Amino acid sequence: RKEVEQDPGPFNVPEGATVAFNCTYSNSASQSFFWYRQDCRKEPKLLMSVYSSGNEDGRFTAQLNRASQYISLLIRDSKLSDSATYLCVVNSGGYQKVTFGTGTKLQVIP
Amino acid sequence: NAGVTQTPKFRILKIGQSMTLQCTQDMNHNYMYWYRQDPGMGLKLIYYSVGAGITDKGEVPNGYNVSRSTTEDFPLRLELAAPSQTSVYFCASSQETGPNYGYTFGSGTRLTVV
């Protein structure tokens, strides 16, 4: 089993739709979790951290389910500008144990 | 602030050639990293540094070397380029290590070895 797994997509959704991505991780000792956004041929950029109680930033909501070992990202009212690849990142204990998922591609359609 | 600056943005190397990928950050971050990203793969850690004069290997260090003489600079050296090193290379930095700090990435270097 991969350390971090994501559905590669692509997820094609119309503008205004709500879309959710999941990311599963294998190490139950994982300590911290992040979502990064990567535009085509650009560098990854931190979108948001994922806290145990769940957290929201505008149209974006991140949740953590430690029992089932997955994190999720919910995007409401999708915009064309949300089209990107979303990377799940899991930290299992320091810089040597940061694992990046392969990403989920989102395409928002007019 | 410029953040993390990488040069060059693109490069084509012939097999056996050498080059240095430059990385500079102006955020006074102690922690710096080099990653490579191959199509369909997650970013893989090549080398990292926890401060000037301190470097260590990551997951995929073979064929690469690094140095960290200053807090700002963290160059990555390829000594004998091989086609397997064709990739996109990202330098990153963070304020601290540990669970609650994300990374700031440079814009990347696209390297092709032919």
Image (cartoon, rainbow, N blue to C red):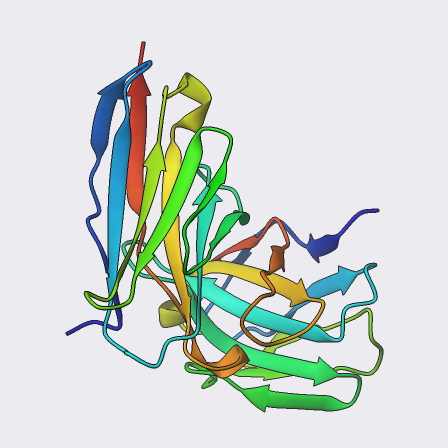
Tell which of A101 and A19 is nearer to you. A19
- In the image, residue B77 lies at what x, y percent? 62, 77
Hey, which quadrant is residue B60 in on the image? bottom left
> Can the viewer see residue B113?
no
Classify residue A76 as left or right of residue A44: left
Tell which residue pokes out farthest to the front in this image. Answer: A53
Classify residue B74 as left or right of residue A39: right
- In the image, residue B76 lies at what x, y percent? 63, 74
Can you say which quadrant of the picture contains the C terminus of chain B? bottom left
Question: Residue B55, relative to residue A99: is it above or below?
Answer: below
Hey, which quadrant is residue A99 in on the image? bottom left
Q: Residue at x 29, y 39 (%)?
A: A105
Tell which of B2 and A75 is nearer to you. A75
Tell which of B94 and A63 is nearer to you. A63
Question: Residue B18, relative to residue B56: is it above or below?
Answer: above
- In the image, residue B35 lies at what x, y percent? 51, 67
Question: Residue A10, relative to residue A98: is it above or below?
Answer: above
Q: Residue at x 38, y 51 (%)?
A: A87
Tell which of B24 and A80 is nearer to you. A80
- In the image, residue B3 lies at what x, y percent? 75, 52
Classify residue A43 as left or right of residue B49: left
Tell which residue pokes out farthest to the left in this image. Answer: A1
Q: Residue at x 33, y 57 (%)?
A: A64
How many callouts does the rendering have? 0
Q: Residue at x 66, y 82 (%)?
A: B49
Classify residue B43 as left or right of residue B21: left
Question: Residue B14, relative to residue B6: is it above or below?
Answer: below
